[in-house]
Each structure stands twice: as structure tokens, then as C-alpha cells.
Amino acid sequence: MIKRLLLGCLLALSGLSAWALSPELANRIAAGESDDRVAALQQALAAGDASLGPFLRALQDGRVRVKAGQAIVVAEGAEAPADAEEPMLNNRMRREIDSALAGLDLLSTDRDTRAKALATLREDADASKLPLLEKALAAEADAGLREQLNSLVAGAKLSSVDAAQRKAAATELSGSADPATRALLLEKLAAETDLAAKSAMQKAVNDIGDRLAWGERAQLLFSGLSLGSVLLLVALGLAITYGLMGVINMAHGELLMVGAYATYMVQQGFRAWAPGAFDYYLWLALPASFLAAALVGAAMERSVIRWLYGRPLETLLATWGISLVLMQAVRTLFGAQNVAVENPAWLSGGWALLPNLTLPYNRLAILVFAALVLVGMGALLAKTRLGLMVRGVTQNRRMAACVGVNTARVDTMAFALGSGIAGLAGCALSQIGNVGPDLGQSYIVDAFMVVVLGGVGQLAGTVYAGLGLGVLSKLLEGWQGAVLAKIALLLVLVLVIQKKPQGLFALKGRSVE
């Protein structure tokens, strides 16, 4: 036992003597009043010696003892001397040690380690760390980290005792677009006494605020376009079932739900049988969601809706009943709780354009997907035989039947197409939120608003109305809140319909008595 204790102490003392950190400075860091210990730590840190790191980590791990005015580092696995005292670490010392270790990590050869250290020091950079920060800046080769270090050095200079240095730092920081930099400037501005430095700080705060305002406007615009693309996807199916066929389908939201649950089932299948290919499940989920919703829509049309063409009130009531049946069926099969659909790795994260402007990849993907679905549906209706027959039946059913078109079959195919597009919308919605039995109820009213506002049977009107309502909704939400924004949108729709009963982009033609 005595031999083991002596061996541990010898190892600790030999290790301490190998460091550039002097025994006197090590003892000041380990013992004494908090202010003195912090001052000693900052003195050691200013030298920027990497040998400080092992001592601080040993102090964190409780392997440092103080005996006879000397700090002893106990080797791992060895027992500490019985008559030595263990240094006390209060919250302040722990924060200072964490900050000091992060500062030392700035000299690491690993980029991720340096990036993590920068994130830690962002909230705790002051003038005492300037020598170390400037040393790290001189050695930094990565352009992105170098830019962050420049801001960190300027932020640390704001704590300098030299007013001219504080003014120069504020002037340098005025070109930033980081909300954290603005918050730091505001904090220093409140305590600044020098008029020149105070004026420079105020100007920097205003400049950064103006720059951040553009980021907020861009974020608001993107949020509106993102919501508009979702509404467009949801409304595209209605543009056929309601806009072209005149069927008020209150179960349209549940067709979205069917597509979302089809996506969930495909995800679970990949997770169980092909976990290595999980990131590709969405490519199979897209056709699966389309087919699942299209089959449900075709069954609805053949069993119920085909008997109700030309009777909008009965269609509304019947499809509302079908929506309740579908919701209860999903609750029975999957439960009443929401299920989580996980994004593939390539849809996770976002594209950071500004510190306060990040465009999520899943939202960007939905914007692109909505555009592709719109182009595909427009080409199908305008360039294919099915599209020709759909347009012929919707414009003049009797004449289409006279020239040999099977109108009942076309009705089924058109309704299945609109339902399948709703399924694609459900697949897209599964990537930005939870999937549950009530998923479609959140979008059905907005989808009808888009179709009615854009003009019945007009794809271009659906696009303009969807994107317009999305952007307008986000603008009103930022101004008056979500509830009042919905009310305002409804009032806008009522006013538009009063002036243009057929919508903004009504079909032009003459009515024949």
C-alpha cells in the first residue's frame, strides 16, 4: 500500500515538473480565493501553453490535491495522499475552467474541436483571453473559422480597459450579421462611459439590426412560400375533383392522410427489412402514397360519388361521412396517437444563408416537389389522351359520350388522379410534421379557399392563390397572430368572391341558354 502511494505521488510530481506550468502557478489555480484563482488561471491561459490543459482536466476529474503549498496531480488509478486536501470547485471556477479548456482547444489540429471551442467561447470571450485568441487567429487556416475568430477577437476587445480599443472593436463588429454579436454590443453599450466608444457601439448595433431585419424579411418570405407550396400541393388534387369535376369532396383531407400513412408504412418496412437503405425509402414512398390514395379515391367514386354528380349538397354530406369512416379506420389500424415519420439524412438540416436565416432542406424539397407535380399535372391534362378525355367530359359530357368516350371510366380515372395527387401531398406533409388521423382536417378549408380564390378549373389560378395565401398568411400572423390571420384571410376571400364570383382567374366564355 505504501509503495503504491509513493509511486502515485512520484508519477504525479514527475508529470507536473514536465509541464511548462510552474508549481507556484499551479498551486494558485488549485487553492485560495476565487478571484485569485481566476487571475492565476487567466495568467496561465495568456501564455497559451497547451500543457495547461492536462492540469485543468485533472482538476476537473478530482485528481489534484494540495499539500504544503504545492499542487499534486494524482495519476489515474493511484491513491491520493491521506494528508492532502482536495481543491474545492464552485460554479464560477468550473465555468472558468471550461472556458479556459475551450480556449486551449482553439490550438487543436482538429477542425471540429476548434469549431466546438469557438461555440463555447462565444458567450465568454473577454480581454483576458485576447493573447490566446490572437495566437489562434494567426494559426487558423480555415476561412469559416477564421471569420468567427475575427468576430470573437473583436468581441473580446470590447472588454478592454482602453476606450480607443473598444471603439475600434465596435467599428469592426458593425459589419457583422450575427444576433449574438448585437446582443453583446447592447450589453457593453449599457455599461460604456466613453462617449466616442458609446457612439461607435450604438452605430454598430443599428447597422447589425438593419442587416438582421433583411434576414427576418427573407425568412418571412420563405416561410410564406413554404406554406404556399404546401397549400398548392393540397389544392392541386381539388383542382381536379372540385375544379374540373364539380365534386365537393370533404374527404380530400383524409386522402392526404392516406398518403401520409402509406409513407409511414414504407418507412417502417425499410426500417425492418432494409435498414441500410433507409435514406432511400422516400423514393418508394412517393409512388406508394400516390397509389394508395388513388385506389381509395377510385373506390369512393365507384361506390358513392358516381350516383351524386350534379347534386353538390348530397355530395358534400356523403363525402363528409366518408371522411369520418376513413379517420376511424385509421384510428383502429394505427391508433389515435400521432406516428413519427423520420426525414432521410439528405433532407435533415438546412442551408444557412445568414445567422438568422436558415432554409430547411425538407421545406426546400417541398417547394421543388410542388413545382414538379404542378408541371407534371399540367402536361398530363394538356398533352395526353387521358387529359384530353378529362377536359372533354368536364366541358360537355353528352358530346363526349356521343363520340365514344366512356364517361364513367373517365370520371373514375380523373377522381383517382386527383386523389393520388392528394396522396403525394400527404407524403410531402409527413416530412414536416407528425402524421395522425386528423392530419387532413388542418388543410381542407385552406385548400378549398385556394381553389375558389384562384378560379374553378384553373391551374394557374391555383398556383397564384396558393402562394399568395401562404405569403399573406405569414405576413398577417407576424402582425396580428395566427387566429386573427385566419379571420383576415376569410374576409379577403369573401371580398374577392363578392367582386369576382368565379375567382381571380375564371374561365372565359359564353353561356348557352
Image (spheres, grey):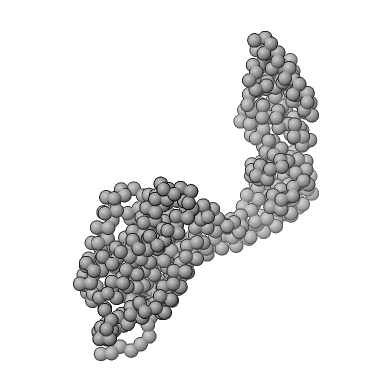
| Among the 4 quarters of the image, the one containing residue 378 | bottom left
Left or right placement of residue 315 versus residue 266 in this view: left
| Among the 4 quarters of the image, the one containing residue 485 | bottom left
The residue positioned 59% from the left and 60% from the top of the image is 215
Residue 214 position, x and y percent, is 60, 62
The residue positioned 65% from the left and 18% from the top of the image is 78
Judge whether residue 458 can be spotted in this image.
no
Residue 183 position, x and y percent, is 63, 49
Left or right placement of residue 49 versus residue 329 in this view: right
- Pick whichever, 467 or 342, lies toward us: 342
The residue positioned 32% from the left and 54% from the top of the image is 437
The residue positioned 71% from the left and 40% from the top of the image is 108
Q: Is residue 357 above or below residue 4?
A: below
- Pick whichever, 181 or 228, lies toward us: 228
| Among the 4 quarters of the image, the one containing residue 59 | top right
Judge whether residue 368 can be spotted in this image.
yes
Residue 338 position, x and y percent, is 36, 49
Q: Is residue 464 above or below residue 281?
A: below
Left or right placement of residue 44 versus residue 416 in this view: right
Q: Quadrant of the N terminus?
A: top right
Q: Is residue 130 above or below residue 327?
A: above
Q: Quadrant of the C terminus?
A: bottom left
Total numbered labels placed on residues in the image:
0
Left or right placement of residue 503 versus residue 81 in this view: left
Q: Residue furthest top?
A: 2
Residue 383 position, x and y percent, is 42, 79
